[in-house]
Amino acid sequence: MNDPMGTPMPDAPKKNNTPLIIGVVVVVLLCCCCVAGIGGWWLWNNGDSLVSGSMGAISLLA
């Protein structure tokens, strides 16, 4: 209590957000990989019908 009234309080140490940022990036990358994998699997199984269906629609336009 010997400090004068005008003395500012010392700054608190800054919190390190690096682990949080790395965690968010890893989760987003895993989600993107899962979406790409599921999309690739779906195209592998349904790609032929998708292409043949779109070719029929294109021939109707021409």
Image (spheres, rainbow, N blue to C red):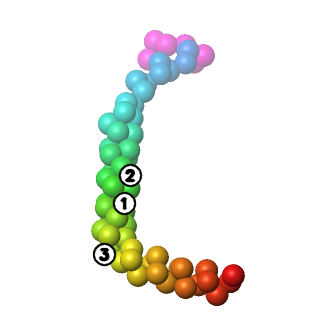
Who is closer to the viewer here, 27 or 38? 38
Residue 57, position as x, y percentages in the image: 59, 84
Q: Which residue is mark 3?
A: 45
User: Mark 3 or mark 1: which is in front?
Assistant: 3
Q: Amino acid at mark 1?
A: Ala
Residue 11 visible (yes or no): yes
Q: Is residue 44 above or below residue 1?
A: below
SS of the residue at dot 2? helix
**Is-magenta flag for residue 57?**
no
- Residue 28's label in the rendered image is 2
Q: Earlier in the sequence, mark 3 or mark 1?
A: 1
User: Mark 1 or mark 2: which is in front?
Assistant: 1
Main SS of the magenta part reads loop
Between the residue at mark 2 and the residue at mark 3, the CA separation in whole angstroms equals 26 Å
SS of the residue at dot 1? helix
Residue 21, position as x, y percentages in the image: 39, 40
Who is closer to the viewer here, 38 or 46? 46
Q: Earlier in the sequence, mark 2 or mark 3?
A: 2
Q: Amino acid at mark 3?
A: Asn
Q: Is residue 46 left or right of residue 10?
A: left
Range shown magenta: 1-6
Q: Which residue is mark 1?
A: 36
SS of the residue at dot 3? helix
Between the residue at mark 1 and the residue at mark 2, the CA separation in whole angstroms equals 12 Å
